[in-house]
Amino acid sequence: MQSVQKMKSFHIQNGHGLAGIQAKEHPVPQPGPQEVLIRIRANSLSFRDISIMQGNYLLPVMPDVIAVSDGAGEVVQTGSEVTRTKPGDRVAVNMFPLWLEGQFTWEYAAQIGGSLNGLLTEYAVVHQNAVVTIPDHLSFEEAATLPCAALTAWNALTSGKPLLPGQTILTLGSGSVSIFAIQFARLFGARVIATTSDDAKAERLKALGAHEVINYRTTPEWHKTVRQLTNGNGVDQVVEVAGTTLEQSILSTTAGGQINFIGRMGGDLQPVQIGLLFMSGAHIRPIAVGNRAQFIAMNKAIAVNKLQPVIDRVFDFNNSIDAFAYLKAGNYFGKIVISHGNSL
């Protein structure tokens, strides 16, 4: 099939930090009857990778797993029974390869870069059902930002109670899920209120489409400002990414509104008063990234609107450990991308 016999990949040991990331060589894998071989052209990192490094990721992680859930590349070989894609197709891989559509259940919990080998490698074999084509206007580096952060934001805003034109959404911080949520909300014709930690980031969020931005360092009780900005009604949806801010998110939400509970990026979760939760009338909806059908729908919307993902910095594949160190330092705005070079 090809002259390349060996490939390089980066493996991670759950809970061992940066010291647990190692480069290794392997034979290039061969696809089974319903599998495809993808030449990975780019990856992106997510907060999930920090959780795995620190050993507090909530789902199982296999020993010596090939790292990273997010990647994009080109199909170079297909198995004898593959019908969904062909060599030369530009594709990404759904993080939960068994979750094709519908609601998440634990039978779909196998995930790329965790209980399954990831994509921080030169070649990867995946089942054809996990593959989605990427928008034509995106580079591989841009497309590699979509599988985790973008799809999480898309799932939050389009499922459960879909965000409608004229409604108001609250995004928290300037992480990648929040940035994608701002971009998608503007596509839907919604009003965006955002929070962030400094005025420079506030201006960048406004440039992306946020209508109002609250500095949560100078306004620690920001839920009061959210209420003021919504004439006391509260927002229709919140993209809650921290967990530690859940109580303020509840206080910011209108009766019958939806809090999209993404995860626990902010540290240890704090207990929420049951009375507050009941009286708020808000619906709390946990988000587990998204399924393949949602990924396909999101890519269509990105393509039609020519949406451009926000990239903070691009590292070379051989310097992947430096990319993890940069992620761990936390001083970034947008996605951290790893390029394998020779992008098409």
Image (tube, helix red, strand yellow):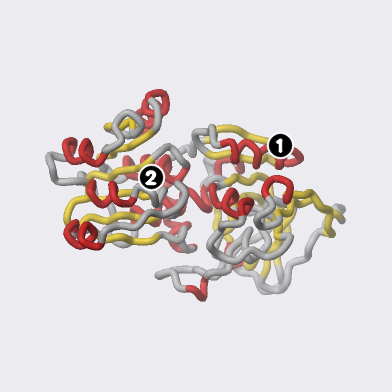
Q: Residue at x 58, y 48 (%)?
A: 50
Instruction: Judge left or right: residue 193 versus residue 269.
Output: left
Which amino acid is tagged 2? Ala
Instruction: Judge left or right: residue 72 versus residue 275.
Output: right
Q: Quadrant of the C terminus?
A: top right
Q: Residue at x 47, y 42 (%)?
A: 176
Residue 29 is situated, as x and y percent measured from the top left of the image, at 78, 63
Q: Quadrant of the N terminus?
A: bottom right
Q: Earlier in the sequence, mark 1 or mark 2?
A: 2
List the residue tagged with mark 1. 316
CA separation, marks 1 and 2?
Answer: 28 Å
Q: Residues within 10 Å of mark 1 (few under 14, many from 20)?
A: some
Which amino acid is tagged 1? Asp
Q: Residue at x 73, y 72 (%)?
A: 32
Residue 4 is situated, as x and y percent measured from the top left of the image, at 85, 53
Q: Is residue 257 visible?
A: yes
Q: Is residue 90 visible?
A: no
Q: Quadrant of residue 257?
A: bottom left
List the residue tagged with mark 2. 181
